[in-house]
Amino acid sequence: MFRRREAVPFSFVAESERFRSNVTPPPAARATVPELLGRALVGLTVVAGLVGSVLVGLPALDSGQSAGHDKQSTASQER
């Protein structure tokens, strides 16, 4: 019968564990001033949106029983 010489079907898979590259990756590019300003603007926009949504949603979270709202309906006064 035919017997394979390699342990895996593709020889490059077996060789990939042994292969070491001598090529160094390029250095990471530094962010330019416009990129930094753009990132800061996006961050400020997100924070402003969150703060705005909390401020708009606060009246809906109010229980409705503050000191100025002691009025009773006319139906409850007639009892």
Image: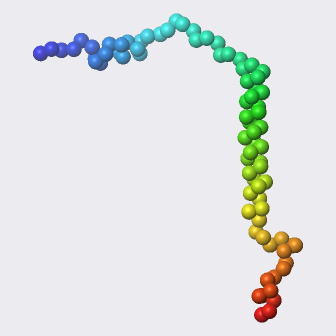
Q: Position of residue 33 (x, y in %)?
A: 78, 21
x then y, percent, for residue 72? 81, 82
Residue 58 in the image: above or below residue 77: above
Q: Nearer the viewer, residue 25 or 20?
A: 25
- Which residue is rendered at x = 74% and y = 62% of the image? 60
> Toward the viewer: 61 or 5?
61
Residue at the spot 73% in from the left edge and 34% down from the top edge = 42
The quadrant in which residue 68 appears is bottom right
Q: Residue furthest left?
A: 1
Question: Looking at the image, which residue is at 73% across and 40% down?
Answer: 46
Quarter where residue 29 is shown: top right
Please name whichever residue, 40 or 19, is drawn nearer the observer in this view of the structure. 40
Q: Determine whether, in the image, residue 65 is placed left or right of residue 21.
A: right
Question: Quadrant location of residue 10?
Answer: top left
Query: Which residue: 58% across, 11% down?
Result: 25
Residue farthest top in this picture:
22
